[in-house]
Image: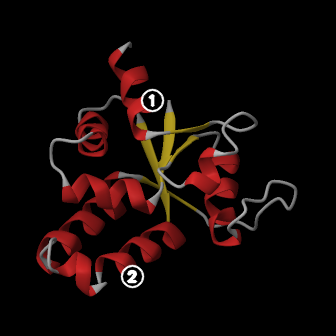
Amino acid sequence: MRAVLDANILIAALLSRSGAPAQIINRWLGGAFELVVSEALLSELERALAYPKLRRRIPPADAAEFVSLLRLAATVAPDTASSGFRRSDDPGDDYLLALAENEHAVLVSGDHHLLQMADKLPIQTARSLLDGLTDL
């Protein structure tokens, strides 16, 4: 299985080391699935981790180490334009939809704009992905 984790899931993994997002990262590191990222996703993650409210909770060194781990250990796919017919209510999320579609991966997010599309596209919450990995 291949998965794209939205930046909000990646950040949640750093904020709560025992929550579903952190467990997903641990399962990925253990080889349970292939994590797919892109430079756009990594850039969004780096920008978010630099926000003052996150810097207070996630030390800059930990943030940099995490992004470096993703860049080295995950599959880095090319950024591609959105296919045009699958658009989120938030156009800023279109690149995630295109990435997941082009890489034949499930998109994991906590974003309600994306989760509203789960009946049409392979989009899951962190908990549903984790439950699926546990059943394997």
**Secondary structure under badge 1?**
helix
Vertical placement of residue 56 versus 134, above or below:
below
- View extreme (top): residue: 135
In the image, what residue occupies the spot 21% across and 71% down? 63
Q: Which of these two is toward me, 37 or 15?
A: 15
Callout 2: few (<14), some (14-19), or many (20+) C-alpha neighbours within 10 Å? few
Q: Give the percent coordinates (x, y) of residue 45.
A: 39, 71
Vertical placement of residue 89 versus 120, above or below:
below
Callout 1: few (<14), some (14-19), or many (20+) C-alpha neighbours within 10 Å? few
Q: Which of the two discs, 2 and 1, labels the residue nearer the N terminus?
A: 2
Quarter-of-image position of residue 92: bottom right
- Give the residue type at disc 2: Arg
Q: Which of these two is toward me, 51 or 70?
A: 51
**Secondary structure under badge 2?**
helix
Q: Give the percent coordinates (x, y) of residue 62.
A: 14, 69
- Mark toward the viewer: 2 or 1: 1
Q: Give the percent coordinates (x, y) of residue 46.
A: 36, 77
In-image side of 81 versus 21 (left or right): right
In the image, what residue occupies the spot 18% across and 52% down? 16
Q: Quadrant of the C terminus?
A: top left
In-image side of 122 versus 109 (left or right): right
- View extreme (right): residue: 85
The circle on residue 128 is 1
In the image, what residue occupies the spot 49% across and 41% down? 3
Q: Answer whether labels 2 and 1 touch (C-beta < 8 Å).
A: no
In the image, what residue occupies the spot 31% across and 84% down? 51
- Give the residue type at disc 1: Ser
Q: Which residue is mark 2?
A: 47
